[in-house]
Amino acid sequence: MSELAQGWRIARRSVLYETHHPGRLAGVVTQLSTQVFLTWCLWTALYATVSFNAGMDRGQAVTYAVLATLYGRLRGPDRGLARDTVRQHVRTGSIVYWYLRPVDPQRYHWVRAVGDQLYGLAWAAAAYTVCRLIGLVEGPASKTAAGLFLLTLVLGQMVLYYLLALVDVACFWTLNNFGVGAMINLTQNLFAGAIAPLWFFPGWFQTLSSWLPFQSSLHVPLSLYVGRIPPADAGHYVLVQVIWIVLLALVLRRFWRRADRQVVVQGG
Amino acid sequence: MDGPAIEARRLRKVFTTSVRRPGFVGALRSLVAPERADTVAVEEVSFSVARGELLALLGPNGAGKSTTIKMLAGVLVPSDGEARVAGQVPHLDRKVNARRIGAVFGQRTQLWWDLPAVESFTMLRDIFKIEQEAYRTRLEELDGLLELASFWQRRPRQMSLGQRVRCDLAAALLHDPPIIFLDEPTIGMDAVAKEQVREFIRYQVEQRSRTVILTTHDMAEVARLARRVLLVNEGRVVYDGGLAELQKEYGSGWKVRVTFATGEVPPGIPGPGEKVGDAHVFAGVDPTAKRELMRSLLDRDDVTDLETHGDDLEDIMAAVYRKRAAVTA
């Protein structure tokens, strides 16, 4: 069995966390459709009296906001419910088994995350199709914009993976990353544009955001999709994403190496 | 390959921890300038285990048993000394080492908590790259020994402790490792489940020639499974040898448990005895005193029950720790 085949077999199990629990599947459908509907209502209402704001028309703004809601689903199933987060494994000591298997913990973590994100992507794609069919969101600004959206979406998900993986690996030292994780989540949602499109924030906020990795994950791909960032400017953003990926990957690798050397198993 | 399956040479493990100062100000100070403290968990532990041998690694809580096992399993990196498993240093190539060993830590599971156990097995099949035919054969064998099929569709969170540990044992052996580390595998189990696990361990050693290191606090288990024991206390080895020799060297005492029809010790019986339930227990180390007591008891009509036996293994272990402590004091 090749490494790739092995990786795929491990990754595809992310689907089991929800398919084995019909209640959770129903919950996801309900939550996602409610969120999408409310977001659509809110942004439609906000544009009721203005036709153009922050460089976006109503269609662009609503599409950005609804797609940002779907984006939340890209992270896959709730591992916390399944007691399968790094924090939970470190705290209970079951992380010991990650070091008793012929797959590097770093690779295993990455493969599982890929599985989660592919599963989440399937959900987001299905929800996107429904939203398009019923006219909640517009299509991409152009074919070029669609291509650049897909490229920057993949790169953005890699940036996000490395950020969240760093929070996970921090557990080897802090034992509990709940506070750090909550902080990163809030920061990520705020600076990525998940709460509101970054175009509506003041200039200084957008400048600050441009120096952080978070906007790479959501704001950039969505802005390309709706045409708020012209395809001609995409090169700069792609370059920034690649720089963040390389930097974060190096830091994460260093962290994993240190964690592997000093792993402590809780509870004797 | 020749040589022992497992070898530990002057293994040492020191954990460095942050000491939290008391109070709010102390907590702030600890945050700014943390105070470090070293804890020696294992100190110069040396031993070897032959292929196909079962070694019982015993000691009180905090003695360093689990830390020793984790160093041998390649999870922890020793602070000093050297561990070798199948001739290799385990932590230097964990991936290679993982194929040679299986491990069960009784208090924590390697099964995916929220998925049916059989999904965990297939996940491990893929992680260990086990061929489908070999996987099926092994799972059948393990099912035959541990009777898993009736509950392997359940999630670990829905299983009893005994069922969960049986699945964990199967998970640890799916890749057919020649060496197994079992850290308190029967902890908290009922008698029936314990017996099944013991039989499973015995089968793995006697029929499959696997090398096993077993830690347990259950002395009945040790007496049933082990010929050789390694006692550790405060991170150091205090005894390494045969179980029979240990009993001979440190277990010179005797105990006689007797029940009198009257419920009280009649006059003329040497020693007061300790009242335990309906019975009285007489104990000592002098064999002459035991013979005298037995003579006086066997002549009596009011003795309704009589048992005699040597020291329990727990008594013997306590004697070892006491003697070693006296020597080092």
Image (spheres, coloured by chain):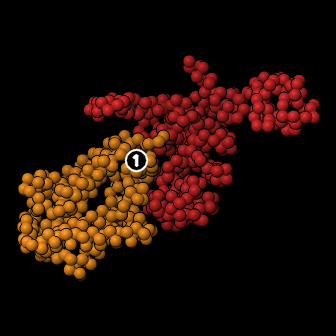
Q: Position of residue A194 (x, y in %)?
A: 21, 62
With A109 as the anchor, is B276 left or right in this view?
A: right
Q: Position of residue B136 (x, y in %)?
A: 54, 66
Q: Chain of mark 1?
A: A
Which of the pair B145/B10 is nearer the observer? B145
> Residue at horizontal 24%, vertical 61%?
A157
Q: Position of residue A249 (x, y in %)?
A: 24, 52
Q: Where on the picture, by quarter, is residue A35?
A: bottom left
Rendered position, B239 above or below A172: above
Rendered position, B226 above or below B133: above
Which of the pair B13/B321 is nearer the observer? B321
Q: Position of residue A185 (x, y in %)?
A: 26, 54
Instruction: Give the colour chain A carries in the figure.
Output: orange
The quadrant of the picture occupied by the C terminus of chain B is: top right
Rendered position, B5 above or below A5: above
Rendered position, A153 above or below B82: below
Residue at the far bottom in the pictured view: A133
Q: Is residue B298 visible?
A: yes
Type of the residue with mark 1? Val
> Residue at horizontal 32%, vertical 30%?
B26
Instruction: Give the colour chain B carries in the figure.
Output: red
With B181 as the anchor, is A76 left or right in this view?
A: left
Q: Which residue is mark 1?
A: A90
